[in-house]
Amino acid sequence: AQSVTQLDSQVPVFEEAPVELRCNYSSSVSVYLFWYVQYPNQGLQLLLKYLSGSTLVKGINGFEAEFNKSQTSFHLRKPSVHISDTAEYFCAVLQAAGGTSYGKLTFGQGTILTVHP
Amino acid sequence: NAGVTQTPKFRILKIGQSMTLQCTQDMNHNYMYWYRQDPGMGLKLIYYSVGAGITDKGEVPNGYNVSRSTTEDFPLRLELAAPSQTSVYFCASRVERWAQHFGDGTRLSIL
């Protein structure tokens, strides 16, 4: 079984400040990792994904995340946030292949990012 | 290209009523999923399907049923609505490249 923990339920930050949203996961097998963003009254939109290769992945809207296998983390960062980044962010893991969890995403509880002017 | 379309967007049901949440995708994706989202709980998988005619239970399947007669459609059925099923329901689909595409959700209240 796999699980995802987002360490902060809410993160307030001022506009143009940097932000980090933390995500830790546990799994007995290799995983793929994702960050999704959800704006109010909308579905989830993919921000970025880690499948293999470089541990630093870049996504849309200036976000990036770093996969750290030894710490089982996949933290999301942005060097300078905008008001429009206010949303809920979800970290998710997917078992890479095989087993009973194949194809099923496991989500964290979500982090609400609020950007203040 | 509409992506994943969910209907209705909002619905209020009485306890014990039944209804079907519709989900259609036009991307020819094999995999489809139903999630429910409750505040502070993230998304929980209800059912999923790896192709037409094949479905399987997720984490929270009790009180729900699904069918997958075509690649495009994956309806979710509530037979006897209960207050605990008040939630926002999301349908998603994907191909082998792992990223799931989500619909805009159905907000369901059971009173």
Image (spheres, rainbow, N blue to C red):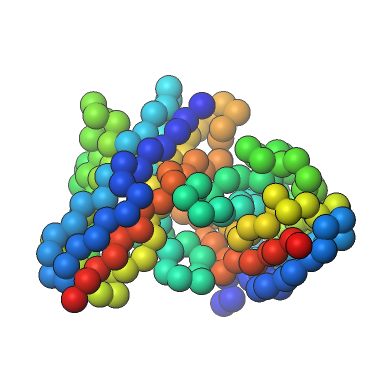
The residue under the point 27% across, 45% down is: A22
Q: Nearer the viewer, residue A97 or A17?
A: A17
Q: Is residue B71 left or right of residue B1?
A: right
Asked whether the viewer can see residue B109, the reply is yes
- In the image, residue A66 above or below residue A88: above
Q: Is residue B10 left or right of residue A3?
A: right
Rendering quarter of residue B92 = bottom right
- In the image, residue B48 above or below residue B93: above
The residue under the point 39% across, 29% down is: A26
Residue A16: % across, % down: 13, 70
Asked whether the viewer can see residue A35, the reply is no
Residue A84: % across, % down: 29, 75
Q: Nearer the viewer, residue A87 or B29?
A: A87
The residue under the point 22% across, 71% down is: A116
Rendering quarter of residue B13 = bottom right
Rendering quarter of residue A38 = bottom left
Q: Nearer the viewer, residue A42 or A58?
A: A42
Residue A100: % across, % down: 60, 28
- In the image, residue A94 above or below residue A19: above
The residue under the point 66% across, 73% down is: B9
